[in-house]
Image: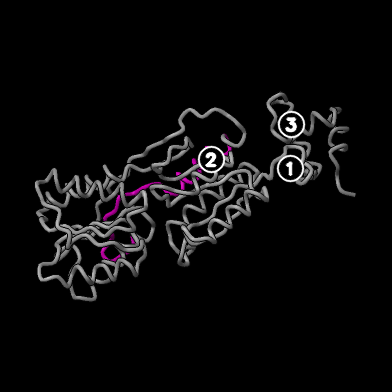
Amino acid sequence: MPVTIRDVAERLKLSITTVSRALDGYDDVAEDTRQRVIQVALEMGYVPNRAARQLRKQRTETIGYILPTSTPRFSDPFFSEFISGLGDEVAKNNYDLLISTAEPGEDTERLVYQRWVHGHRVDGYILNRMRLRDWRVQYLAQMNVPFVTFERTLDAADYPSIEINGQAGIKTLVDYLVKQGHQRIAYIGASSDLAIQADRYSGFRQGLHEAGLLLQQELVIESDLTRQGGLRAAQKLLSLSNPPTAVVCINDLTAIGVIQAASELGLLVSRDIAIAGFDGIEDAEHTQPPLTTLNQPIYEIAREIVKLLLAEIKGEPLAERHIQLQPELILRASTG
């Protein structure tokens, strides 16, 4: 016969209610009592009835993440690391992580969110790859559903978020490249409706301005945040009659594609052209040559986002609702 909560309560000479509240983490149970309950439950092999606990708490104990993608992005190292952080922190708090994918901005994406919200599939949502005006923020705020974002939008809603100061990071990178002697610096970005594009491109323009360099539109190309997109963009830049001597990329995958394009043209990266990215993915350490990048601690950020969301779900006060972090410039051989 499976061990029941009644068996645990009888062993401890406590009421079933006390044992239940101790296991559910309620703060009206003394900490020493809670630890005794947990220890005895483990010794006896008691497994709580998850469905009953969810019904009692009126929660699914599940967090939702709908990955905004039009391509197979589970192979993208950024998302792999981000999801790893989400999963580890969710599991630590005895929650589940429900993941799906949907093409951003399309009707299918709206349908997934509507189905999850109206079906009460999850207790809260994690959003990233934010758009400057993001219907997801507007919809979830209107539906009074907890959510936390990685990056911020221009929407009026108040919501917890973590963001990286990409503007300051890119400006620092441009300043470094200028001091290395580069005058023709290119930028490969992404769609203009993305928050990271607005942030990082602003830093690029500011860096050029402070260095006394003019922005040359022929050296600015929109791509799609992928390796292949970076390859195609670099091929265009390097075919110019007066090609750039340095390329700043919106993310590391784009930069890795630029390294490939340069190598295929017989250019020696670091001597003939400098290339830098943004993200700090593990793959950036192992390119040939290793890639200079602006590092953001993706795994740790994902865990902090989960903590913010769980506090929001439980109605707990947050010391900070809007957290901004500074990226770290990691200089490697790709920029000389």
Whole-percent x, y for residue 324 in the image = 38, 37
Please identify the quadrant where the C terminus is shown: bottom left
Residue located at (25% from left, 62% from top): 221
Whole-percent x, y for residue 199 in the image = 31, 46
Tell me if mark 3 has few (under 14), some (14-19) or many (20+) residues whose alpha carbon lies within 10 angstroms of its own: many
Q: Is residue 335 left or right of residue 100?
A: left
Q: Are marks 3 and 1 in contact (CB under 8 Å)?
A: no
Determine the image quadrant of residue 306.
top right
Amino acid type, mark 1: Gln
Residue located at (48% from left, 57% from top): 68
Distance between the Cα atoms at labels 3 and 2? 33 Å
Residue 50 magenta-highlighted: no
Q: Which residue is mark 2?
A: 141
Q: Which residue is mark 1?
A: 54
Magenta segment, which residues? Answer: 285-311
Distance between the Cα atoms at labels 3 and 1? 15 Å
Q: Earlier in the sequence, mark 3 or mark 2?
A: 3
Which mark is nearer the camera, 2 or 1? 2
Residue located at (57% from left, 59% from top): 100
As rendered, which of 257 and 205 lies closer to the eye?
Answer: 205
Distance between the Cα atoms at labels 2 and 1? 24 Å
Determine the image quadrant of residue 326.
top left
Amino acid type, mark 3: Ala
Helix, strand or loop at label 2? It is: helix
> Residue 3 bears which disc, if any?
none
Determine the image quadrant of residue 18.
top right
Colour mode?
A: one colour
Which mark is nearer the camera, 3 or 1? 1
Amino acid type, mark 2: Ala
